[in-house]
Image (spheres, grey):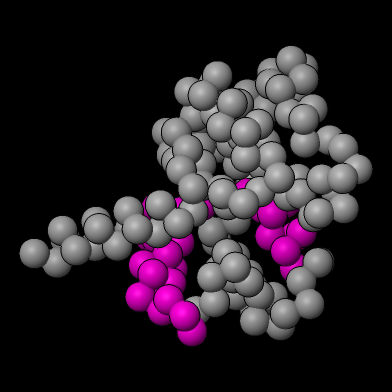
Amino acid sequence: MLEQFPRSIIPELWDLFEKGCENGTIVSERETRKKLENETSDPKTFEWCKAHAPLFKALSEKEANLLGELMKKNTFDVFNNSQLNERRMPEGIPFIMCMAKIQNRIYVFRKNTAFLTSIKKICGEHEIKHMEVEDYLLKLKEESGKQAK
């Protein structure tokens, strides 16, 4: 998100996103933070991850159990190929999907991802609420407008 949607272009949506991160509406998985910090060449991305460390959580026991069940069923095998790894496929996708399912949250993803069809299929099969990041940001904006009234 940091590189795809620069703060200078859409500051209002970034403010809403950060409020969601701070109040616990938006969460991610801690392996995602490690990957971001290890692979970014942008110091702003590194600093943002560091400043928002509480956003990145470890899986709960229930989430870990679901992850194990789904991995035994080869649910996430579609993400395990060299082309996706070369494209920096986030290993955190299965973790975050399990968090979304157990916590009754929305799994948010980029629509221009190489595995969009697979993400939608997995979410549909396992009743995981999901939404493209652009739509989610618009949802945040809409909800903030309702709260302001």
Q: Quadrant of the C terminus?
A: bottom left
Task: Identify the residue at the far right of this view.
Answer: 82
Residue 115 pos. (x, y %): 69, 40
* Residue numbers of the magenta segment: 8-37
Q: Quadrant of residue 61?
A: top right
The number of callouts visible is 0
The answer to whether residue 68 is visible is no
78 and 56: which one is in front? 78
The residue depicted at 91 percent of the width and 43 percent of the height is 82
Q: Quadrant of the N terminus?
A: bottom right
Q: Quadrant of residue 122?
A: top right
Residue 110 pos. (x, y %): 58, 52
Residue 31 pos. (x, y %): 72, 51
Q: Is residue 12 magenta?
A: yes
**Majority secondary structure in the magenta region:** helix
The residue depicted at 29 percent of the width and 62 percent of the height is 141
Q: Is residue 140 left or right of residue 1?
A: left
